[in-house]
Amino acid sequence: MACYVKIAFTIFLSLNLKTFIQGAPQIPCFFIFGDSLLDNGNNNDLHTKAKANYAPYGIDFPNDPTGRFTNGRNMEDFLAELLDFDHYIPPFASAQDSEILEGVNYASGSAGIRNDSGSHLDIPGDRIHLDRQLKNHKVTISRLANLLGNITSAKNHLNKCLFIVGIGSNDYINNYLIPEIYPSSHLYTPSEY
């Protein structure tokens, strides 16, 4: 019986240890590029049908709907937790000053690698495709250079960061597979595309 109590206590302690330990994240910063699977609010103020800042989205998230295309946390939130960040990475649309030192989320629902993917969901064409996400990252680099004193310091900081990219499914779902709107399926075979 004592053995089972010891095992149960060990399991409880290992599962709840993060609650008792305050430590630095495993990496200094985390940058996210992607589509709706990673979007955490960048589409909230865009003129688009691809939004998730209303119920039932976010019903399991601590602060209700946030713009995540889930009922709670998304994959990048889980990664931030596993990397020991004490908060979620902010969306580019609302990231403030020193927050960007720990990273920014550029992901956008309906985004694609191709600039035109998902454009049929937009009124009048507002979405953050990969090219725009990369331009937003250039803005962040400039802001980091201002915060850290120069571009060399910003580049040294960025060299220590984790970058993830989760994008491309909309190039099929919201482009290639809609031949009545997009010409891509008429121009490329599936393997070429």
Image: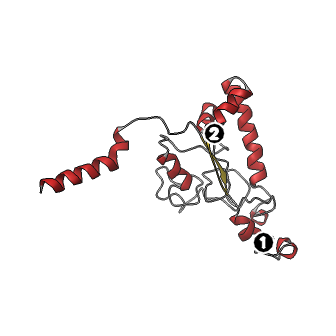
Of the pair 61 and 163, the residue shown nearer to us = 163
Circle 2: residue type: Ala
Q: Quadrant of residue 191?
A: bottom right
- Judging from the image, what secondary structure is the residue with disc 2 in? loop
Position of residue 30 measured from the top left corner of the image (x, y, whole percent): 59, 43
Position of residue 16 measured from the top left corner of the image (x, y, whole percent): 33, 47
Vertical order, 136 against 155 (above or below): below
Q: Quadrant of residue 178?
A: bottom right
- Which residue is found at the position 61% from the left and 31% from the top? 98
Vertical order, 86 against 11 (above or below): above
- Which residue is found at the position 47% from the left and 48% from the top? 82
Vertical order, 50 against 20 (above or below): below
Position of residue 91 measured from the top left corner of the image (x, y, whole percent): 63, 45
Q: Residues within 10 Å of mark 2 (few under 14, many from 20)?
A: some
Circle 1: residue type: Tyr
What residue is disc 1 on? 176
Q: Is residue 118 shown left or right of residue 188?
A: left
- Is residue 122 visible from the viewing direction of this image? yes
Residue furthest to the top in view is 149
Disc number lying in front (1 or 2): 1
- Which residue is found at the position 76% from the left and 61% from the top? 122
Q: Is residue 89 shown left or right of residue 139?
A: left
- Quadrant of the drawing holding the C terminus: bottom right
Q: Quadrant of residue 188?
A: bottom right
What residue is disc 2 on? 95
Of the pair 86 and 156, the residue shown nearer to us = 156
